[in-house]
Image (cartoon, rainbow, N blue to C red):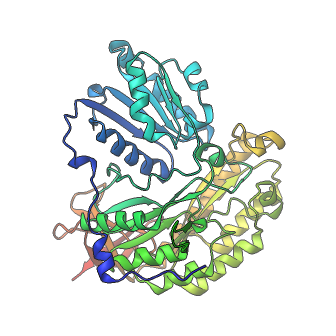
Amino acid sequence: MQDLKVLSPEEIKGLDEPRISPSQHQTDYSKKIYLESYGCQMNFADSEVVTSILMEQGYSTTSNIQEADTILLNTCAIRENAEQKIRHRLQSFKPLKAKNPHITVGILGCMAERLKTQLLEEEKIVDLVAGPDAYRDLPRLLEEIEDGNKAVNVFLSREETYGNIDPVRLHTNGVTALVSIMRGCNNMCSFCVVPYTRGRERSRDLDSILRECINLFNSGYREVTLLGQNVDSYHWQHPETDQSVNFAQLLEQVAQLKPELRVRFSTSHPKDITNEVLHTMAAYDNICKNIHLPAQSGNNRILDLMNRTYTREWYLDRIQSIRTILGESCGISHDLIAGFCSETEEEHQDSLSLLEEVKYDFGYMFSYSERPGTPAEKKLADDIPEEIKKRRLQEIIDLQRKHSAYKNQLMIGTTQRVLVEGDSKKSSAHHFGRTDNNKVVVFPKKEEMKGKFVDVKITHCTSGTLLGELIN
């Protein structure tokens, strides 16, 4: 691997030249799109790509579904209840469709990729089905529907990254933004549909990522989150020079763009996160000291059945490296599944003991949901009764809530650098923002400070929020 060249100030300035964005195209915007997003951050980022593609073709967006010519749902398939939510939402569109049969209803994303034409058969209201790699084809698909046909494209690409498309920022506060750096996943976890709904890993080219980040900064954004199913697997090779770029090098390049631009990333895989990444994080103040490191289970037999390709011991070694290189204040969050196939009570206790040993700041916790077509569905019995799954999940949630409160209490009396994201949800007299280690802070507003970095002394906390006072 060649050494990655550090960008000079002149080269960084060269990235400032904006590409043509949809807002700069002269169109009549006569057709209106209503778009809802469900699931992970990747889906929300994809919706911003979809909007960009359609605005290039003369569409505009609306938040009023009654005004829409086309209704699109960008969907998730990670759990059964996620798909049921979409099916229930489709039922609510029936009166609209009955009133105006010309309205187009489309399903995008992972549920579309998983069910394909089956969606058209099961949900008669659906006119369009497009998978995560088919968004460039949406204008043609919509033309097909105008000609009286149903339209489907669920082709999975080995090259598509949407790297040359400027996303239209929909799900943003104007301060923080999502930047997709790769697509797909090569980790064949036995419980997961993502490799089948998003395809194989593809890394986006370095220059397009840097350009998007600098353009966001120039537009007033002060934080970017680099997104991938497994960011640590990022690997891009320049087609002409054979220069190779790994995730640690990409992270460093983004951090060097502007010292005032905060950088986060998600998600890391325990088998791949390297000390090189951790040392890069330690070297730059504007790389946030926060890592999402899904565990999924604390028991080695269950980890093996899940095909996670690491052991509890390996995972804890990674946690120790994070603590050693980045310090005890680095925020660590997790994913954990309760009631996976054949999980015994003792193995559930291993997950609880993992929580006790690590004491995470935050977690995403779920009971196991069998997904059709996955290795677990084909080879393993979903044999844990629902009432036991729910009880185990509640025990995990209760313990995590206790640890979240404990980690927040440790911050009382400290002064934290906070990026102000806007008004608190509960009071316009208070601002809220996030610390470097990704904790929400609420404090009394003295003046409008959205988008600014401020120092806040932490005075109180709940299990989910820090409360504090501005320091002049």
- Residue farthest to the front, as pictured: 240
Quadrant in the picture for the C terminus: bottom left
Task: Name which residue lies at 57% across and 69% down.
Answer: 403
Residue at the spot x=44%, y=48% of the render? 46
The answer to whether residue 60 is visible is yes
Residue situated in front as seen by the camera: 418 or 233 = 233
Q: State the image quarter where residue 355 is shown.
A: bottom right
Decide: is 180 above or below 87. Answer: below
Q: Quadrant location of the N terminus?
A: bottom right
Give the residue at x 55% y 84%.
279
* Residue 51 pos. (x, y %): 35, 43
Instruction: Give the image location of residue 112, x and y in percent.
Output: 55, 34
For residue 110, what is the image quadrant?
top right
Residue 249 x/y as whole percent: 51, 77
Considering only vertical position in the picture, is 468 above or below 194? below
Q: Residue at x 56, y 65 (%)?
A: 231
* Residue 62 relative to residue 434: left or right: left
